[in-house]
Amino acid sequence: MNCREFEPLLVEVVRAAGQSGADAATGPSKRSDLDAALDHAASCPDCSERLAEERSVSAGLRLLAAAEASREPSAGCGATLLAAYRAERGREVHARRWILAVSGALAASLVVLVGAALLLSHESSTLVRSLYAKLSPLAGRPQASGWTSSSASPSAADLPATAEDEAYDADTAAPEQEEVTDFVAYYPGADLSSLDSGALVRVRVPSSALGSFGMQVAQGSEEEWVSADLLVGEDGSPQAIRFVRAVSRNSTN
Amino acid sequence: MNQDTSPEALRRFAAAGDEDAFRALYDQLSGFIFRFALHMSGNEGLAEEVTQETFLMLIRDPGRYEPGRATLKSFLYGVVRNHTLRALEKESRFLPFAEPGENAAGELQGSEISDPAADASEDLLRREQIARVRRAVLALPPVYREAVVLCDLQELSYEEAAHSLACAPGTLRSRLHRGRELLAARLRATERHKAGAAAAAVPLGGPICRPREEFS
């Protein structure tokens, strides 16, 4: 080994000899290289001087490290950090609760929306089906008479219905305290069989109007007002009408 | 608290809300962090600030540490190094810190020494040497100072120190070599200065200085 090869190994030779640093025994240089460097220093006055100087530096650094090994941050530093840790955890817990609350509310809103959408779609299909059922017999039957309970529509049973529909019908059937007539074509002779959609509008009409649809008007009640459901077509014109009569619960039971 | 007390595990538990784990982590690492900042800056107040900032980062943004890349200790040394260098640049607070028994200028105070003469002399010499080495380390350019502090004072492996300084182990070794070379030169110069001062203070057989007016 010569002086040029010795120089890069100098620090490792000293660190290995002084057992200083985690690399003392397992540095990148081989043990044999370090031994060769020591042999070279023993025979070279310049390198021997450099080695002594490096050893002195190592000794000084070890002394400094030992003198300051017990230096620690103040107790106040730890207390401040612990307070910061607690505050941060508190913030996180608060944020987590808030997120849970918001997501819960969103989930609930979603359920309500989906439920409402299902309800509406079911209601409209039931209404159309029920209207269709009621209107189909009207085709070619310009007028009808007699009151029937709206909850016991015999023609509705003719339609195919799912179990869901039946359950729904049971829950949402018209109240029993109302009786309705069959639908009657609003314009005599009109063909109602082609009507498959429309809107039902509840109106109040004078009792005398019953007569114009072939129904009997009770004596002395011409001035009274009765409820009627107007079936309005997509063009906005009335297509059919039925009359509604309120019946008290006691009288139906 | 869990059985695993490695810094990495403690960080994980602390991040999950385990306060005991956070305390244990602080107890394990705060000394290393504080001393690294102290050796780098020579300023106790700044070292404490840096220690706080480092742990605050760990509290507020624990995800910044990626376990697969380095040990938590080397990662935190990297954070400390950046904070310290930034603070030194910003505030220019490069002041030598005082040990107990030493004033801010690094001079030893006699009142601290109460041992009999021989012990006192030995203690004085030891403390003088420590103060000289400390000043020499602080006088190194930061790039060499951090290599010397991490490898020789904090006793990190080349690999860990290289991770902390975000450089290759070969680069670190070369910086360490150069840093120690500069340190040796500075200590040599201090020795010469001290010897020169001592010779000037004791003019054995030399000319006696007289007040100026005596020549006029």
Image (cartoon, rainbow, N blue to C red):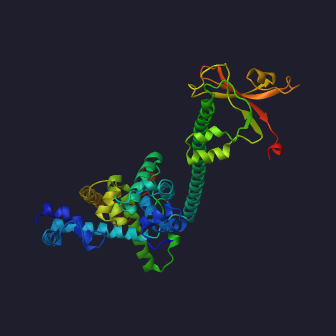
Q: Quadrant of residue A210?
A: top right
Q: Quadrant of residue B126?
A: bottom left
- Up-down: is B95 above or below A23? above
- Up-down: is A39 above or below A153? below
Would you say residue B196 is visible in this rendering? no
Q: Position of residue B186 (x, y in %)?
A: 32, 58
Q: Position of residue B208 (x, y in %)?
A: 38, 61
x 61%, y 23%: residue:
A233
State the residue in front, A105 or A23: A105
In the picture, the quarter occupied by the N terminus of chain A is bottom left
- Up-down: is A71 above or below B164? below
x 60%, y 30%: residue:
A136
- Up-down: is A105 above or below A198? below
State the residue in front, A72 or B25: B25
State the residue in front, B211 or A144: A144
Q: Position of residue A101 (x, y in %)?
A: 61, 51
x 67%, y 19%: residue:
A188
